[in-house]
Amino acid sequence: MLETLDAAAVRRWCGAGLAALRAHQHEIDELNVYPVPDGDTGTNLVLTLMSAQEALQGEAAGPVTDAADEGEAAQTSLGLVMRRMARGALLGARGNSGVIVSQILRGMADTFATTVSVRGLELAKALRKASEAAYAAVARPVEGTVLSVAAAAAEGAGRIKSDDLVAVAREAARSAAEALARTPQQLPVLARAGVVDAGGRGLVVLLDALVEALSTTTAETSTAETAAGATDAAEEGAGDFGYEVQYLLDAEADAVEVLRGTLDGLGDSLVVVGTGEGRQQTWNVHVHVGVEHVGAAVEAGVVAGRPYRISVSRLEDRIHDHADGSHGHAHADHPASAPGNGAQSGATGRAPADRGAVVVAAGGGLTSLFAEEGAVVVGRNPSIAEMLAAIAQTGAGRVVLLPNDANTHAVAVSAAREAAAGGVRVSVVPTRSPVQALAALAVRDSQRRFDDDVIAMAEAAGACRYGEVTTAAREALTVAGRCHPGDLLGLVDGEVHVIIPAENGPETAGDGPETALTEVCRQLLDRMLGGGGELVSLVLGADAPAVLEDVLRTHVAQAWPFVEVQCYAGGQPRYHLLVGVE
């Protein structure tokens, strides 16, 4: 067991933490209390830690400091490695939990920056700093979440007042686990679902990995790092696995299980993430292999299904500088993303040259709509690096971000903060749906001051109530009652208000105008328009039947004759219909 924390232990922790999160990925994803499979926490944490791991493996690739760093030369070896891990996690952070974990790592890195020797008391101090950084990253902290778990870990570590490094780490992990068990008592939505907080569970996994890393002797390092894909050879120049292979894959789950085994034998840093919907799914495949196995990694995808957007790059060539935004991964939720940073842009737009807009969206129709408005579009559930790349792609000095999802808001705010360090002024308009982004962009006026324009866009977005029709991916207790997998759901402002059971349902959604899908759409429109409205925007999803537009236009004309209807073919996945009422 270690008496003092060193750089090698941090590398072991990162590798062990990533391996543990992969092992618990599905379990953590299933802790999602919402029936819609958006931004699954386990998947987001795996992708966040994978970015941290790659930052350590590519230490020679480029600068890792940020605006808060001064005098890197004064930092210890431990401080530099911890900074690289935290910086990698920040750029790869996805979802609220990913951002919070990256801030926890950053708080620890700040503590270790110039510390020569880290024993128990110093680790306790770092955990306290980490908890403070996590709370500071959230505009409205909520107890019963990963924040409570982080605070308990810091409190437990400090309470024993010991300088024994491993003892402090164990007490932090134990206190975090106890706090996780209490989260349902603090957050009613968890109690109703009978689960603990997913982000908090991920943090407990990471703290357990820290204990494991500190309990591993130098002689045991090789085995631990090999299992986690974190060898010293990789850090010095990518070693035997010097090439990154990525592609999207349309395949069935059984074929992907065979693919996992094949790729696991070819390389390391393997992540295969699926949409989790239907027999034929879209998967994001990522693996590091040697040059002699690049072809085999791609060929394995051909055997499993239909690979596309294939990307092969040398790890030594990866630049981790946030200014170019190149450090990031494609995600299975990004069917509309371009290769590389996942951003698409219209050739022309309404914004002046010194202003730009970045919108998060998926679906060919929505991407085209936003591009016509002069916005750069980035795929769903983006990382901070992908957001930064999109900001850079605007070429503007003042940029508006429209995240279109509550789970992406923290990523957008962090990206705005990072961009500001590079001299770009970025404001986030807190849109929760693409229909709110359409409303916001419609009032953009280049003749106004930038601040006034942002206010006007925020007001327009806030005045647009949004609705969604989707299929439940899991059982959940909602304000409209309990739903089950396969049920059709109508949501208003993020809350389920209409449920049509699966037996009535999704399999008949395209048979004709009188189907369960059209019925839930009609009920949702009536519920939303019952609260008033002059304009309703309908955005049809990728699997919406051809008759749906005519059926809904007819319904609104008959039931709400004074309401104007606009309809777009959005092509978005998962959501059969998006509705905006203004």
Image: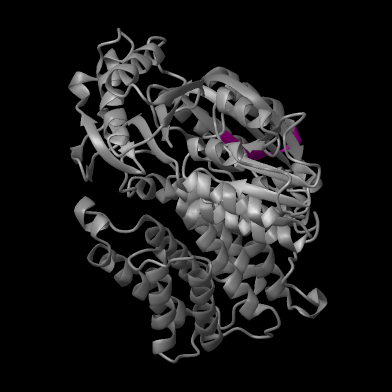
Quadrant in which residue 562 is drawn: top left
Position of 578 with respect to 510 (left or right) is right
Does residue 19 show up? no
Position of 111 with respect to 147 (left or right) is right
- State the residue in front, 207 or 139: 139
Residue 55 picture location, percent across and down: 69, 56
Quadrant in which residue 575 is drawn: top left
- State the residue in front, 424 or 531: 531
* Residue at 27% from the left image edge and 27% from the top image edge: 486
Position of 118 with respect to 145 (left or right) is right
Does residue 350 show up? yes
Task: Please tell me whether the stretch drawn in magenta is mainly helix, strand or loop.
Answer: strand
As drawn, 266 above or below 517: below
Residue 229 picture location, percent across and down: 60, 50
Picture quarter with the C terminus: top left
Position of 129 with respect to 88 (left or right) is left
Q: Residue furthest bottom?
A: 161
Colour basis: one colour
* Residue at 29% from the left image edge and 65% from the top image edge: 183
Task: Based on the picture, tell me whether residue 517 belongs to the magenta stretch.
Answer: no
* Residue at 66% from the left image edge and 52% from the top image edge: 54
As drawn, 546 above or below 27: above
Q: Residue furthest top?
A: 512
Task: Based on the picture, tell me whether residue 286 belongs to the magenta stretch.
Answer: yes
- State the residue in front, 282 or 376: 376
- State the residue in front, 160 or 569: 569
* Residue at 29% from the left image edge and 30% from the top image edge: 524
Report the span colored magenta.
285-291
Residue 33 picture location, percent across and down: 30, 48
